[in-house]
Amino acid sequence: MKVEFAPLNVPLARRLQTVAVLQWVLYFVLLGQMSIAITVMLIIHNYWFLYIPYLTWLYFDWHTPEQGGRRSSWIKNWTLWKHFKDYFPIHLIKTQDLDPSHNYIFGFHPHGILAAGAFGNFSTNYSDFKELFPGFTSYLHVLPLWFWCPVFREYMMSIGLVSVSKKSVSYVVSKEGGGNISVIVLGGAKESLDAHPGKSTLFIRQRKGFVKIALTHGASLVPVFSFGENELFKQVDNPEGSWIRTVQDKLQKIMGFALPLFHARGVFQYNFGLMPYRKAIHTVVGRPIPVHQILHPTEEQIEELHQTYMEELTKLFEEHKGKYGIPEHETLVLK
């Protein structure tokens, strides 16, 4: 196979976009593990004057990711995130106005490999979120285990990420006076294993916890579909029943996160690497589903609302797929 190298005369703006996305990929792939390794090394070599103060701080600060986090406007406004958005590029599309006196749960689909659309639109200050949804604050929920990583957790919270635990989501959508949006990538780690180009497979039928929280707090549900999310990476073929998928599923159950074997392009060549392809992402926010508060919802009420949500999600996909390059015969697969 002939290697296709990047030209030397690439505009500076595109170079900066590559740097921004490279740090994002490393951020998710390496930095969490590195922060744990560095902390362990400090303990082994007895640099107590470094790790004791921090671990003391960590003890008292442990629940902050479940209490709205600790975001930094300075970090969320880094120009780095503008270059990140422009790399793909990432677009946010609104289909209906929302009432800022209410709280909402955005169900984001699909997960893709690294959920670039969710991060670019709802975690940085360079998307059109503030213009499209004035009066709202978005909270992107991620796996709690990321907040177990010393120091790394501070960086995560600074860009607006919070835990996806029940306590955390409830904290956000219970705000008096409304104005909060919980953004949950509902398919989670399991769905990333089905993130193949040209496919629209969602893991949603067993995800009902968000529906119960919505009912308990009276938070309206909003389906969100991010067209192009599954086109950013290729993944080693892993059909259900294959030995690769069996190992991935077992590791996901043990560790809580999936290990998709993905690849795309490199920094200086276009044939292979961990950099995503430059494919446009169009994140479409659907119509809100009104939810009346029920402090103790029954299984029947949860099931009914969950079914309504899946129907609205399917309608959203069907109404907009033609605009963003999905063939008319392609359908949404709900697992």
Image (cartoon, rainbow, N blue to C red):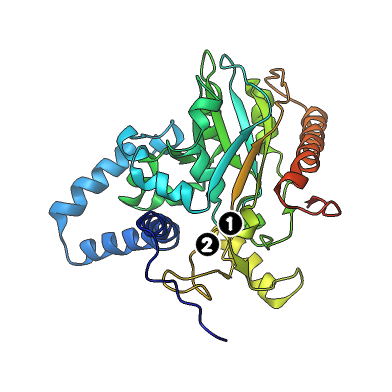
- Is residue 229 or residue 309 the one in the foreground? 229
Would you place residue 151 above or below residue 199 in this image? above
Above or below: residue 298 compared with residue 335: above
Whether residue 308 is visible to the viewer of this picture, yes or no, is: yes
Q: Visible in this render: residue 205?
A: no
Residue 188 located left or right of residue 5:
right
**Foreground pick, 267 / 293:** 267
Residue 326 horizontal side relative to residue 81, left or right: right
Whether tag 2 and tag 1 are in contact, CB under 8 A, the answer is: yes
Q: Which of the two discs, 2 and 1, sits closer to the camera?
A: 1
Mark identifier at residue 279: 1
Q: Position of residue 175 (x, y in %)?
A: 51, 19
The picture places residue 244, in percent across and down from the top left corner, at: 66, 75
Residue at 61% across / 26% down in the picture?
104
Q: Which residue is mark 2?
A: 276
> Image point 52% across, 24% down: which residue?
180
Amino acid tagged 2: Pro
Q: CA distance from mark 2 to mark 1?
A: 8 Å
Which of 232 and 12 lies nearest the eye of the viewer? 12
